[in-house]
Every structure is written in structure tokens, then in C-alpha cells.
Image (tube, grey):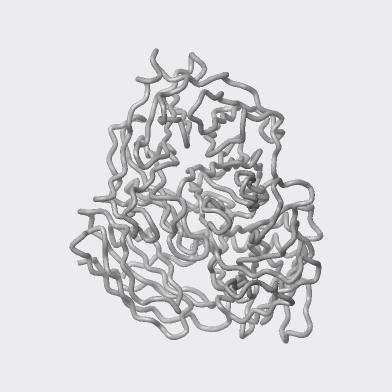
Amino acid sequence: MFRLSFISTFALFALAVHAQQTASRPGAASSKQTYCNPMDISYRYNFEQLNERISYRSGADPVIVNHKNEYYLFVTIQGGWWHSKDMSNWNYVVPDKWPMEDMCAPAAMSVRDTLYLFQSTFEQRPIFISTEPEKGKLLFYNRWLPRLPKDIGPWDPALFHDDDTDKWYMYWGSSNVYPIFGAELDKSRNLTYAGNNPAEAYKAMFWLDPYNHGWERFGPNHSDPFKPFTEGAWMTKYNGKYYLQYGAPGTEYNVYGNGTYVGKTPLGPWEYAPYNPIAYKPGGYATGCGHGNTFQDIYGNYWNTGTSWIGVNWGMERRIVMNPAGFDKDDQMYVITRFGDFPHHLPTQKGTGYNELFTGWMLLNYKKPIVASSTLAVAPTDTVTADRVADENPRTFWVAGQNRPGETLTTDLGAEYDIRAVQVNYFDYKLDIFNSDSTVYTQFKILTSMDGKKFEVVADLTKEPKKDHACAYVEIPVRDNGKPVRARYVRYEHVYTAGKHLSINGFRVFGNGLGKVTAPTTMTAKRQKDQRNADLTWKKVPGATGYNIRWGIAPDKLYQTYQFWSDHTDKFELRALNVGVPYYFAIETFNENGVSSLSNVVKAQ
């Protein structure tokens, strides 16, 4: 029976470091040693929809660049970027100059002491550079990248410098008509397209092929016949091979993921990776992880960023995720999305194996009782009650009666648990904030109790600098004796958010129970006549909170995960497979106490 280690030696080392560094008083955000998707950054209020009077935070199409051993995050239409020294605390940077309009799906690249930045465009636009991006300093590297033919772009661009040859390239594409394109850039002419005629300097890299690649089909769970979109190119070079990545099939669906083609040269020819998609997260709270980039942290670990969908206020309302990534012994690229929206350790050294950053802190309050201090009176057709914050659906939400200090949400976990972290995801309900400014920030307290009567404060965001936390993630410090806070009740106490309404779409409590992990179970997998599909069934286990279906192209390469909750189905039609590729499946159960062993691996027949 194939089984991956639940907590590796490195994870135990990181856990020990975390316990030592978080033994502090409530509110010490700087000691955070874990993270949780969606990323906790100060998403800017989106001004795209001003004419429709729609106001919402959003972020999409991320690029994280490791520049001089510090991190810079660039996101669509944010008026600036974020800077971090630890991948945990991200500080917003306002540039001293900006292009003719805000940047959509920007390309960013670090080469030696210089950071390069370029925006999506169908017109002539400049490439910017900076040697002091932490200060917002931007300079023009060139004034105009020559215009390409109509509708070609470069939209959703990616810049790539081949360190081995000192050659420069650009890749781009965002369309359900055109392919991903690529072109060499001429360094001697300020990174313009190589050759005398820009219209002939680029060439097609590849098109989508949904008739053979099931995961490239459009719609929720690939169920829509509409022609899919490809976008978000990115290049990674590993072990002499070139991995040209792309997003598909559409940002507004749970199956938005990243795939890759592999070549021996930067411009192909390309071979489709049979293990695609490399990044895929169709189940859970933060679904979708397409259109991002791949980067290495200061220890050399790989990461893959992506875009997660909300889509209530507007179809393009989104958040950012980052997931550990890597290459296995066969140079197969993978992105780890197993428990991808549960807390993970931030690395303190070079990793040694698959999935070692998962903390093992489980979700403790899935659909458990939640009591709110007040609820807004709305039309009978709308539901904004407190139970919506515990259903693991970012498109359902609670709205308080008033946006005032002292409003609370209290969850009864039903038993005593060790409380390790809390995530509070805010929702923008009928707001009129069209630009983020000094009045846009979030503050709250987290309290715990054994009996539901006497509460103590275990985290206090009023003690940190004012910052907007649309997806606030708070570690709960351990006690002075080194033990976690133990409680049955966990309370969110409101202090401040900007705007007319206080609304939350996710109040998520993480930690560990004192009981037993649920028993393992079994599953079957049957390939359909249409090889892009497989029918999966499994046996439900008493006491399970949920199930992870794991699959891949070999028994020891089960890199893909689809998470299901226990009150949902026990059968599913998976429509994400590649024609002509063998697949293997297994299942694990989980509850508040941890994760079961993996079942026997079965081959889809």
C-alpha cells in the first residue's frame, strides 16, 4: 500500500520552531510562522465597476518574485504591489510613477540586481525596471515595446531570462481563439522583439485541446460545452528542461488550474505533460488556483501562485493563493493543493519531500453551531444568517445588523479542542468604497471559552498597525507553558471595518481534537468510454468530516486532490483526465483529530 508521510521530519522541525517563536502574548502578528489560503494581504477595492456602483476587494493573476532574497507580489489592478521579507507579512508599496493606466496581469522578473515589470496590453507600452522596488522606485527601461497585430497582445505576459544563455523571452496569451505565444527579446535593443519585424518575431507555442485534455473543458467541474480559455503563461527552467505553464479553462470556475508543456528549448517544440494539470483545487473553501506563477523562495523551495474565485459582487471577484510546488525524481512538476486552504508552515530551510509543510491543524467548526449578536434584516429571498460563515462556501455570508464595535460570532465546537489558528474572511456586502485609503482597515479580537460564559482574549488585532485584512489569518499563541489554548467556544469580536456593513463569508477555526482519527475507507474508480471521465465511488465512514480523493499517473504520484465534505456525495464523475493516460486513485478520510492512512491504490479500469 502506497502512503505519503503525514508529518515529515522537516515539518516537525518547523513545528518546533513555530512553538518556540509563538510563545508570546496575544496580538503579536510579527511572530506568524504559518500561512493559510486565501492569502492575507490588503486586497485593494476594485475600481473597474465604478459605473455599476459595485464595490469590492479583489485580486487576481498573481506573480511573486524573489528579488534580492525578498519577495514582491504583483496582482491585477492594485495600484501598486506588496513587499515581504518572510512570505507572511506583506506590506503594500505605492510606486512613485505608474503606467498610463493600472496594470492588469503584470509580468515581473528579477535578473541580478534589477526587477523588470511589464503590463498586459494590446497597445504600445513600456517595460519598467527597479533596483529599489521596496521603495516604489520605477524607471523606464524602454519607452515602447512595438505593437503587435490586432488582438494578438501581449496580454497576460510573462518575462523570462535564461541564465545559462543570457537570452530573454516573453510569453503571453489570453483567449479562447488564439494560442499561447512566445518570442525572443533583443537585449541590445532594450528588450524589443528580436528581428526587424515584430509581426514576424513571435510564434504560436500551443493551443488548448479539450477533446483530449479533460481538465481544459469549460464550466463547473468541466461541464460546459463553451470553448475554454487559455491564459497566464509562465516559464520555469528545471534540470535543463523548459516548463511553459498556462492557466485554463476559465477563472470563474472551481476547476481553474495550471498546466504545463515541456521543451528542450525556450521556444519549443513542446510536449504536453501527461500528468496535467499541475495545479488543481476544485474542492474546499478556496477553489481554483489557475493563472499564477512559479518561483523559488530563499531556501530554494518551489511555489506556485494562483487565482481563487468568489464571483458574487462581480464575475471577476477573486482572491490569491500560493501552494508549495516542486519536481519529483522523474522531473515531473507538481503543485500541492491537498488541504490547500488549511494552515501550512512557512519554510525555514530547504524541503525534503512532498506535502511536508502541512501543519496537521484541522478545520474544527465545519457546519457547527454559530450564534451572531445580530443579523441584518433583508428580503425573504436573501439569507445572510450566521450559519453561512461555517459552510465552507465563500459565496454565502453573514451580515451583522450594524457595523459597530462589539458585534460577535460565537462558534460552539461541541467539545474541547486545541485551538491553533483562526481565519476571518470578510465579504463586501453592498458597499460604496471605491478606493482603498487610510480608513480601510480591519480590527477584531478572538476570544475562547470552556463554558460559553467566561471568555478570554487570545488574539487582538488592535495591537498591531492598522491594515486591511480581507482574509485575516491569525495564529493563536501557545500558553506560557508551551501548550496550545484549549477551548470549546471560539468568538470573533468586531472592532472595525470600513463601509456601511459588516459581512463575513468564512469564520474558520483550526486546531486539533483530543480523540481518534477516523478509520480509512475504500473506493472504486471506473474509466468511462470517454477516457476524459471516470466514475468514482467511496464508502462513507462514521465520524468523518470529509474525504480527499487522490489521483495521479502512477501509484507513487498521487499529486492531485479533490476534497469532499462528509455531508455531500459519496460518488462523483471526475472529468479532468487526459486521453490515453493511465490513472491511479486512493482516498483518505479526515476529521477534527487528523487524517487517516491512505487506502489501497486502485487503477481506473
On the rendered structure, is 111 left or right of 377? left
Query: Residue 353: which quarter of the image?
Result: bottom left
Residue 228 x %, y % = 36, 48
Please, is residue 213 above or below residue 482 in the view?
A: above
Quadrant showing the C terminus:
bottom left
At a point 63% along the width and 47% down the height, the residue shown is: 46
Counting the numbered discs, the total is 0
Query: Residue 539: which quarter of the image?
Result: bottom left
Residue 297 x %, y % = 55, 44
Q: Is residue 236 visible?
A: no
At a point 56% along the width and 50% down the height, the residue shown is: 349
Residue 419 x %, y % = 65, 73
Which is nearer the eye, 510 or 481?
A: 510
- Residue furthest to the left: 529
Residue 488 x %, y % = 66, 82
Please, is residue 150 above or below residue 38 in the view?
A: above
At a point 59% along the width and 26% down the height, the residue shown is: 128
On the rendered structure, is 497 left or right of 33? right
Q: Is residue 513 visible?
A: yes
Please, is residue 252 above or below residue 150 in the view?
A: below
Quadrant showing the N terminus:
bottom left
At a point 70% along the width and 60% down the height, the residue shown is: 21
Which is nearer the eye, 602 or 175?
A: 175
Which is nearer the eye, 586 or 229?
A: 229
